[in-house]
Image (spheres, rainbow, N blue to C red):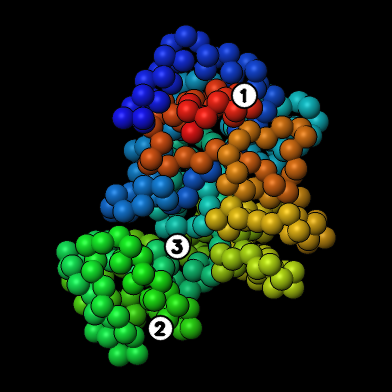
Amino acid sequence: MMRRLRLAALAVARALGLFALSRRLTARQLRILCYHGASVRDEHEFRPGLFITAGTFQRRLALLGMRGYPVLSLDDALARLDAGSLPTATTVITIDDGWYGTYSLMAPALRSAGYPATLYVATYYVEKGTQVFNVAAAYVLWKSRSTLLLLDKVDPELRGRFDLSRPESRDEALRVLEEFGERRDATARQALLRRLCEVLVVDWRAMELSRQFGFMDAREAGLLAADGVSLQLHTHRHRFPEDEADAFAEISDNRRSLVRIMDGPTPHFCYPSGKYQRKQLPWLGPWGIRSAVTTDRGLASATSNRLALPRLLDSELVTDLEFEAELSGFREVLRQLRLPRLRQ
């Protein structure tokens, strides 16, 4: 009910010209869009906040063109933001992680629209070629029609009986599997995932053949780079430790892997899952990082900290109307006015 009321209020605001007014008020602020994966099968039904359909992504790109939002590269946009010469309502497209759907579905849509994009790549799974264990395992627990999981059937070292009809029980089963898998290498985790699929009667062959929950490989990432997609830092193992030396190792491994894929500098960074601590920001400059994006919601201005840039998160959970409310700056104005109902 509250969501329907909120959408109705947004529709009224647009009809009254408040979206257009907000666009003028926020004209010199930078819109940095954030995407993650594209759904190659039914991932958008499993985690609509993480995986977007190709159709929805194409509609978003079409809306940018229809509404006249100039799309610039991250490098160009930040340089113009610094110089005070940013075109009205400039937009940047960023994509996190490196999922195969980004290569197979999102990149062709960007190419067709003629838009540049920045892809923040977590390179571990690019190198390993296995599925992302924690996300794939959560999907299998969600997908299975079985209501009971006995973990000793998956691996004799595991224990636990879980009712998969209950979300909290699925979460606990996933926690146990993650902890167990974390102590094993990528190949062993892939074998564990296959066994989980067999126990829960989920077709792991179909998952692997479609490359569901897999990343693009180094060759594919290189093709994107050659096609103009800017590959940038996202840590190697999708984690940014609190210890400075460990964090530096993540950046170093990530950069070393990217250098093997493409030529070009890597001065831009995305915090894994958008999570960061203020103490970590001073580390980045000496490591050659000029900008870092978060999942903090908002528009970037000339005074924004370049190492904690906000973004606008888009996903299958966001309607076209809500997307336009963010893009126009209407919700940013509401955030500044601290009006909670419509800014959500």
Classed neighbour count for the residue bearing mark 3: other residues with Cα under 10 Å, few (<14), some (14–19), many (≥20): many
Residue 151 seen from this side: yes
Based on the displayed image, in which of its 4 quarters is residue 272 positioned?
A: bottom right
Q: Name the residue at 48% across, 74% down.
A: 128
Q: Quadrant of the N terminus?
A: top left
Q: Earlier in the sequence, mark 2 or mark 3?
A: 2
Q: Tell me which amino acid carries mark 1.
A: Leu
User: Relative to 277, is 134 on the left or the right?
Assistant: left
Residue designated by label 3: 215
Helix, strand or loop at mark 2: helix
Q: What separation in Å lies between label 1 and label 2 (alpha carbons)?
A: 52 Å
Of discs 1 and 2, which sits in the foreground? 1
Q: Is residue 333 above or below residue 123?
A: above
Q: Position of residue 150 (x, y in %)?
A: 24, 80
Q: Position of residue 238 (x, y in %)?
A: 56, 64
Q: Name the residue at 48% across, 26% down.
A: 342
Q: What separation in Å lies between label 3 and label 1 (alpha carbons)?
A: 41 Å
Q: Earlier in the sequence, mark 1 or mark 2?
A: 2
Q: Check residue 337 in the rendering and tell me which mark sits there, or answer none.
A: 1
Query: Toward the viewer: 126 or 248?
Result: 248
Helix, strand or loop at mark 1: helix
Residue designated by label 2: 188
Query: Toward the viewer: 214 or 302?
Result: 302
Classed neighbour count for the residue bearing mark 2: other residues with Cα under 10 Å, few (<14), some (14–19), many (≥20): few
Q: What separation in Å lies between label 2 and label 3 (alpha carbons)?
A: 17 Å
